[in-house]
């Protein structure tokens, strides 16, 4: 019966193979894959895309392990029923079985690893990968529109928004000049119909002559009769017909001032389009399974058993350790700056500050030790000669290389404390 079930599963797996993702994060971790095999590390460096391509083209067929969670060779050798059903070298089948059924059946994907000593550090740095610089959000949501970095309510129909103001749109034939609409061209209405000899003592005869030529009617301007302007135009002075401004616009001669109204000061957009995520005012590409984003960097979610507490960009043994580690990483650089500034001001250790800026780490260490020795001697009422201090510093520096002495106890600048605060192991190297 068991063999029959396996045969059915094999048939189903053949149909399912095309749909099964063989780079599922539970069986493929590009960083783990590159670090596990020196030949891949040498060939591809940190190129995750090339690592994935190698996994598909060669790694699966070769039975390589690409995740700390699953080893296809171990899986086939541990479970004879799967090996018999799929074949000894069918590593793709082993992957598909584990993802589809093995996890649910509580089958192990990897063997037990040798216990490792718990690191002395209080935290470890999580695996990270860049996700690019963030972009400013531009999605303002329904009923709003984006303009020059801010979100505003959409303007009423017939209006266009420019920052905090909605301006009426110009009608057809009018040029948009920002706050104004330039009118179409005016036209002249001629020299008019003046009084002539033989006319009476009024302009009735001049009006008759004008109306004979202009059925729209005539009007007087000054002492001359002129044809009335066409519909949509009005007279400007004696001889020009200028276009009328649309209702609500203010006529200022050659242009019409637009009506407008305010729509508020605007708000900063906080929505990201196209599947991006919002963080601290910027939009970023999501990190994907197993990672969370902090600014332009994606940090791994999983913490080792010995460092179970998420802690900023890493993992810590406890909440208290996390707090202390973060405080030290903030405080120690400030102390170092203050200490070096104090040394320069007092003049007692200016050589240390100069060497810290210009020479190697070895010289920095020796100068720090010597400066501290001279200071301690003065506190005891002794004067330590320069040659003696130099020789003592060299001896103590060489001693610390053997591990029998730590020069950080004599470091007056705090440089050693900064190194100590940030010198943490990588979480990926701890199991």
Image (tube, helix red, strand yellow):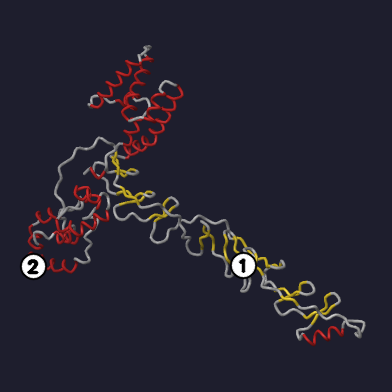
Dot 1 crowding, Cα within 10 Å, few <14, some 14–19, many 20+: some
Residue shown at the point (30%, 42%) measured from the top left: 125
Query: First in sequence: mark 2 or mark 1?
Result: 2
Q: Residue 102 vs residue 312: left or right?
A: left
- Residue at the extreme bottom: 212
| Above or below: residue 80 compared with residue 255 | above
| Above or below: residue 121 compared with residue 339 | below
Q: Measured from the top left, where is residue 250 in percent x and y?
A: 70, 67
Mark 1 element type:
strand
Q: CA distance from mark 2 to mark 1?
A: 80 Å
Quarter-of-image position of residue 336: top left
Dot 2 crowding, Cα within 10 Å, few <14, some 14–19, many 20+: few
Q: Measured from the top left, where is residue 60 in percent x and y?
A: 17, 58
Quarter-of-image position of residue 107: bottom left
Residue shown at the point (23%, 24%) measured from the top left: 404
Residue shown at the point (44%, 27%) measured from the top left: 341
Residue shown at the point (80%, 78%) measured from the top left: 191
Q: Measured from the top left, where is residue 235 in percent x and y?
A: 76, 74
Q: Measured from the top left, where is residue 115 in percent x and y?
A: 16, 41
Looking at the rendered structure, which numbered label has been put on residue 176? 1
| Above or below: residue 121 compared with residue 31 | above
Quadrant of image for the N terminus: bottom left
Looking at the rendered structure, which numbered label has been put on residue 89? none
Looking at the rendered structure, which numbered label has been put on residue 4? 2
Count of number-bearing discs = 2
Q: Which is more toward the observer, 366 or 84?
A: 366
Quadrant of image for the C terminus: top left
Mark 2 element type:
helix
| Above or below: residue 86 compared with residue 374 | below
């Amino acid at each position: 019966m068991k063999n029959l079930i396996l045969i059915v599963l094999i048939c189903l797996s053949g149909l399912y193979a095309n749909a099964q993702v063989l780079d599922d994060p539970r069986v493929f971790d590009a960083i783990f894959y590159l670090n596990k095999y020196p030949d891949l590390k040498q060939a591809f460096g940190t190129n995750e895309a090339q690592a994935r391509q190698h996994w598909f083209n060669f790694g699966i067929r070769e039975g390589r392990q690409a995740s700390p969670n699953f080893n296809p060779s171990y899986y086939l050798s541990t479970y004879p029923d799967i090996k018999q059903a799929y074949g000894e070298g069918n590593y793709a089948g082993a992957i598909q079985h584990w993802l589809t059924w093995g996890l649910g059946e509580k089958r192990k994907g990897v063997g037990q690893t040798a216990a490792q000593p718990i690191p002395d550090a209080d935290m470890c740095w999580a695996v990270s990968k860049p996700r690019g610089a963030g972009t400013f959000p531009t999605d303002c949501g329904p009923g709003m529109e984006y303009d020059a970095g801010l979100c505003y309510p959409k303007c009423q129909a017939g209006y266009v928004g420019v920052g905090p103001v909605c301006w009426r749109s110009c009608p057809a034939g009018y040029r948009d000049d920002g706050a104004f609409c330039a009118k179409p061209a005016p036209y002249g209405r001629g020299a008019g119909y003046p009084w002539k000899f033989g006319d009476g003592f009024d302009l009735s005869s001049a009006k008759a002559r004008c109306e004979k030529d202009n059925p729209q009617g005539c009007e007087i301007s000054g002492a001359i009769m002129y044809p009335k302007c066409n519909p949509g135009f009005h007279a400007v002075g004696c001889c020009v017909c200028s276009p009328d401004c649309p209702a609500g616009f203010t006529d200022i001669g050659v242009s019409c001032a637009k009506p407008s109204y305010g729509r508020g000061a605007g708000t900063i957009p906080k929505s990201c389009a196209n599947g991006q995520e919002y963080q601290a005012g910027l939009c970023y590409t999501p990190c994907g399974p197993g990672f969370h984003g902090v600014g332009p960097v994606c940090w791994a979610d999983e913490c080792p058993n010995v460092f179970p507490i998420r802690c900023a960009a890493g993992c810590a043994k406890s909440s208290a350790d996390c707090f202390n580690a973060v405080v030290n990483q903030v405080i120690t650089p400030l102390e170092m700056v203050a200490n070096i500034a104090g040394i320069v001001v007092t003049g007692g250790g200016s050589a240390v500050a100069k060497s810290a800026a210009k020479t190697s780490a070895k010289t920095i260490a020796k100068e720090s030790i010597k400066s501290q020795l001279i200071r301690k001697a003065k506190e005891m009422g002794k004067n330590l000669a320069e040659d003696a201090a130099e020789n003592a510093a060299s001896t103590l520096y060489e001693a610390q290389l053997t591990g029998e002495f730590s020069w950080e106890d004599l470091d007056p600048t705090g440089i050693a404390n900064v190194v100590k605060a940030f010198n943490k192991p990588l979480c990926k190297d701890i199991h």
